[in-house]
Image (cartoon, rainbow, N blue to C red):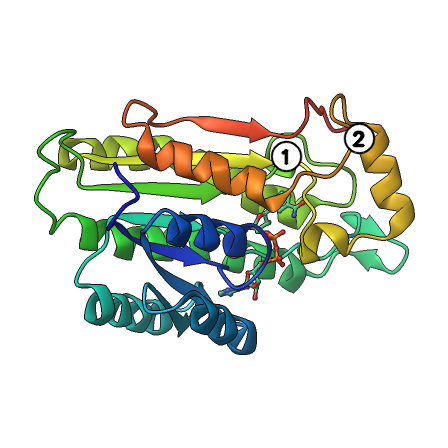
Amino acid sequence: MKIENSVAIVTGGASGLGEATVRRLIAGSGKAAIFDLNEARGQALAKELGPNAIFAKVDVADEASAEAGLAATRDAFGGLNACINCAGIPGRIGRIVGKSGPMALADFKRAIDVNLVGTFNICRLAAAEMLKNQPDPETGERGVIVNTSSLAGIEGQMGQIPYAASKAGVIGMMLPMVRDLSQFGVRVNTIAPGLFETPMGAGAPPELKEKLISTLEFPKRMGAPAEYAALVVHLIENSYINGELIRIDAGTRAPPR
Ligand SMILES: NC(=O)c1ccc[n+]([C@@H]2O[C@H](COP(=O)([O-])OP(=O)(O)OC[C@H]3O[C@@H](n4cnc5c(N)ncnc54)[C@H](O)[C@@H]3O)[C@@H](O)[C@H]2O)c1
């Protein structure tokens, strides 16, 4: 699918990996709807990028909020071709049983709600919108979905159960989603980033970051959001990639702690 003149939703588009993706899509003459809770950053970004970008204050985990975001996208751009899910939270760090007892169930549920339920919520509404499209005469495609998991969804470290479980869920729902949507010409792929230089990635304590960077193979540095965005663009443009989980992690295999 071509980026030029395409319409994409980017959740979490006001910051980090999502913001870099929005910038790349607009630079490629695409249109982007930024779905995020951070109104100040989202509005400022949309204003900076001009008429091909809109901001919608959306809580991805909330049905009505997501539906309103979809309606705003339809009103602004008339349809939807791509959906990139980047909204996410790191979740509570802590062991299953800590010094003060078992982990609070609410901490587990919160990560699942935003990272997994939120991703599914946007996917289901975006896919329904894409099914209204005529297939692309060249590729037969009606749409493309790119979801964001994490290295933690494959190799979760100690203290990461809520986040790891939510991100593993994003990987687990990909294949049935591909199978549900293939007859309509909608592709679904998942990116598992390692350690990236974003407000979330950079928010880790310096000693933890140093330790994580030391586990990287090559290059031994945090990933740049633009490197993630370049992969999203490739996944949109390359019609033959479907049902794929792609690590972008400098060859890392996460150690237990
Ligand atoms: N940065 C990393 O090292 C890294 C590594 C692996 C995976 N990831 C994943 O990549 C994605 C993007 O992360 P990032 O590093 O850009 O983080 P970030 O914190 O810079 O951006 C996340 C954005 O999501 C938004 N958001 C959070 N909850 C939301 C909700 N309920 N509804 C709508 N928007 C919401 C935030 O407001 C923020 O703008 C996340 O899913 C994250 O788990 C990041």
Count of numbered labels shown in the rendering: 2
Q: Position of residue 238 (x, y in %)?
A: 32, 27
Q: Amino acid at mark 2?
A: Pro
Q: Amino acid at mark 1?
A: Leu
| In this picture, residue 9 sits left or right of residue 36 | left
Q: Position of residue 131 (x, y in %)?
A: 15, 47
Residue lying at 65% horizontally and 37% vertically, measured from the top left? 152
Residue lying at 52% horizontally and 64% vertically, measured from the top left? 14
| In this picture, residue 92 sits left or right of residue 188 | right
Residue 149 visible to the viewer: no
Q: Position of residue 211 (x, y in %)?
A: 88, 36
Which residue has dot 2 on it?
Answer: 256
Q: Is residue 106 above or below residue 193?
A: below
Near-viewer residue (187 or 94) = 187
Q: Is residue 226 above or below residue 241?
A: below
Tell me: is circle 1 under 8 Å from ligand 1.
yes
Residue lying at 43% horizontally and 63% vertically, measured from the top left? 60
Residue lying at 25% horizontally and 36% vertically, measured from the top left? 1
Of the four image quadrants, the one with ligand 1 is bottom right
Identify the mark nearer the N-term, 1 or 2.
Answer: 1
Q: Residue furthest bottom?
A: 40
| In this picture, residue 170 sits left or right of residue 138 | right
Residue 81 visible to the viewer: yes
Mark 1 crowdedness (10 Å alpha carbons): few <14, some 14-19, many ≥20: many
Q: Residue 151, which numbered label?
A: 1
